[in-house]
Image (cartoon, rainbow, N blue to C red):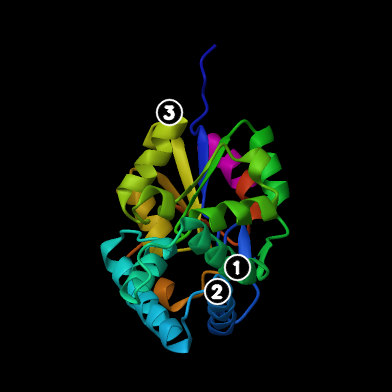
Amino acid sequence: MTDHRRFDAVLLDLGDTLLYFDGDWSKVFAQARQTMLHSLQYSGLQVGHEFLDDFYARMESYYRERDTEFIEHTTHYILCTTLADWGYDQLPDVVLRAALADFHRVTQAHWHPEADAMPTLQSLRQMGYRLAAVSNAADDANTQALVDKLGARPYLEFVLSSAEHGTRKPNPMIFRSALERLSVSADRAVMVGDTLGADILGAHNSGIYAIWITRRADTAANRAHADTIEPDARIASLSELPTLMGRLEKGG
């Protein structure tokens, strides 16, 4: 029997697509860094607020760099190199992991699943689509923990973070890696995400049909790309995705 399905797989972004953040970024991350500092001090390191200021400055510099180079240096790497410059270059990895776990425990408390995330994933699986997540994130363990918090693990074949892969969306390499894992060609996949410059441009650069979800997409970065990056389709919420996929399969 001939398979007339147009698409086989749906790739999904995480932040502001399946999950949303309910806090003030600057305040939450300041609290997270303070908690990380306490963890390092508990492990016996003689570091204080000057160290924390240095770490913060390096993270801010890196955030600016990664948005142009699309290479992911993990939070673990930045913490490790900062500590090395402060004289702690032979630390057991368990100390670093514990500090980062305490850091992310603070931020994870502010991430919540979108109300329609799980019903949509269930519907897409029932429609026969293979599902995976592709996320820009500086820590893979944190990304995986958020997926478990969402409860999406049973529906996703894998979760590919830029921290694991080493490149960030819109670099086509991370999309190609996801397609290779699925053994699906680019023209048989769609990408759903909220960021024009990462999700939509990256999908287009990889030959993937790009769907823009707009409910949390009113950001300065998206407004800057509004006249230059055009999605193939747009939806206001995830609950619209199964209907859109059904329409696309029928040639709509």
Q: Earlier in the sequence, mark 1 or mark 2?
A: 2
How many numbered badges does the structure rendering display? 3
Task: Label the magenta part by its dominant secondary structure.
Answer: helix
Q: What secondary structure is found at the residue carrying circle 1?
A: helix
Q: Position of residue 11 (x, y in %)?
A: 50, 45
217 and 87: which is toward the camera: 87
Report whether 203 appears left or right of 37.
left
Which residue type does callout 3 highlight? Ser
Label 1 with label 3: CB-CB less than 8 Å: no
**Furthest-left residue in this view:** 69
Q: CA distance from mark 1 to mark 2?
A: 6 Å
Quadrant in the picture for residue 98: bottom right
Q: Quadrant of the N terminus?
A: top right
The residue that label 2 is drawn on is 36
- Does the magenta run of residues contain 160? no
Which residue is drawn at the image coordinates 45% and 82% (left, top)? 52
The residue that label 1 is drawn on is 102
Q: Position of residue 81 (x, y in %)?
A: 34, 68
Which residue is drawn at the image coordinates 68% and 69% (left, top)? 109
Label 1 with label 2: CB-CB less than 8 Å: yes
> Could you classify mark 1 by the number of other residues whose Cα lies within 10 Å: few (under 14), some (14-19), or many (20 or more)?
some
The residue that label 3 is drawn on is 183
Q: Earlier in the sequence, mark 1 or mark 3?
A: 1
Q: Which residues are magenta?
A: 243-249
25 and 186: which is toward the camera: 25
In this view, 87 is above or below 194? below
Report whether 68 appears left or right of 18.
left
> Could you classify mark 3 by the number of other residues whose Cα lies within 10 Å: few (under 14), some (14-19), or many (20 or more)?
few
